[in-house]
Image (tube, rainbow, N blue to C red):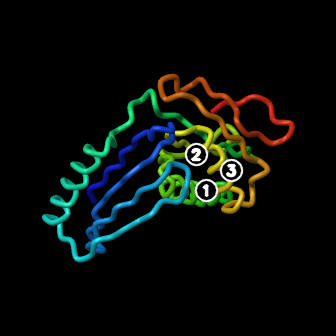
Amino acid sequence: MSYTRLYRRTEGGDLEFREAWHDEEAAQFVVNHGAVGHVSATSTTDDVDAAAAEGLMDAFMAQCAQDGYEDLGKADLWRVVAQFALKTREGTDRDRHLERQAAQALSSHLAWRGLGTVDGSSIGSGKLNIFTTCVDPGKAVSAIKTCLRGATSDFTKLTVAVAPATDPEAFKVRHAPAGARGFSI
């Protein structure tokens, strides 16, 4: 599946995105767009084979370039980690279920709002970490809290921290449960 996501800043400073992909299984070319942090609008073209999809992707890229959309550089990206405190050091089957459930929910929630992607997850040292790369840390933290409040039963154990992609270990906590101290991966 070919896929691309591009961004531009409006004159007012807001970030907008456009993305397109070819879903070979459904034989569709999909274009999704909107303001970062808000549910996007989607349009599809049906009965698209690989050759037609290549032409549509070329046209999409040309239109994006003309409209000022481009890839963001590392300086515009943020590392955002959603972390759950666990009851055991290495986690349980329930914790692995939470990991799959939360990562899947976040992946969809962030993508449909142009906010970013889930890069992976890990369980260890009594913590479940879900790693994301996002384009707007404030909107990403709000989206993560909203998503995980509805998708998991462990919201009261959630800490969210952000760091610039250019300094990926310089985390600052943006959300933490009452009484939580510090942040480490």
Residue 180: image location, x then y, percent: 81, 36
Residue drawn at (54%, 39%) of the image: 136
Of callouts 1 and 3, the N-terminal one: 1
Secondary structure under tag 3 reads helix
Q: Residue 102 bears which disc, if any?
A: 1
Q: Residue 145 bears which disc, if any?
A: 3
Front-most of residues 147 and 81: 147
Label 2 near label 1: C-beta < 8 Å? yes
Residue 21: image location, x then y, percent: 31, 59
Label 2 near label 3: C-beta < 8 Å? no
Residue drawn at (45%, 41%) of the image: 10
Q: How many marks?
A: 3
Q: Amino acid at mark 2?
A: Ile
Instruction: Tell me how far mark 3 sits from mark 2, CA to CA.
Output: 13 Å
Instruction: Tell me how far mark 1 sits from mark 3, CA to CA.
Output: 11 Å
Q: Residue furthest front?
A: 11
Secondary structure under tag 2 reads strand
Q: Quadrant of the N terminus?
A: bottom left
From this view, report whether residue 143 is shown above or below residue 52.
Answer: above
Q: Residue 130 bears which disc, if any?
A: 2
Q: Residues within 10 Å of mark 3 (few under 14, many from 20)?
A: some
Residue drawn at (26%, 43%) of the image: 65
Q: Quadrant of the C terminus?
A: top right
Of callouts 1 and 2, the N-terminal one: 1
Residue 62: image location, x then y, percent: 21, 48
Looking at the rendered image, the disc whose residue lies closer to the viewer, 3 or 2, is 3
Looking at the rendered image, the disc whose residue lies closer to the viewer, 1 or 3, is 3
Q: Amino acid at mark 1?
A: Ala
Q: Amino acid at mark 3?
A: Lys
Of callouts 3 and 2, the N-terminal one: 2
Horizontal side of residue 14 vs 149, given as left or right:
left
Q: Residue furthest bottom?
A: 47
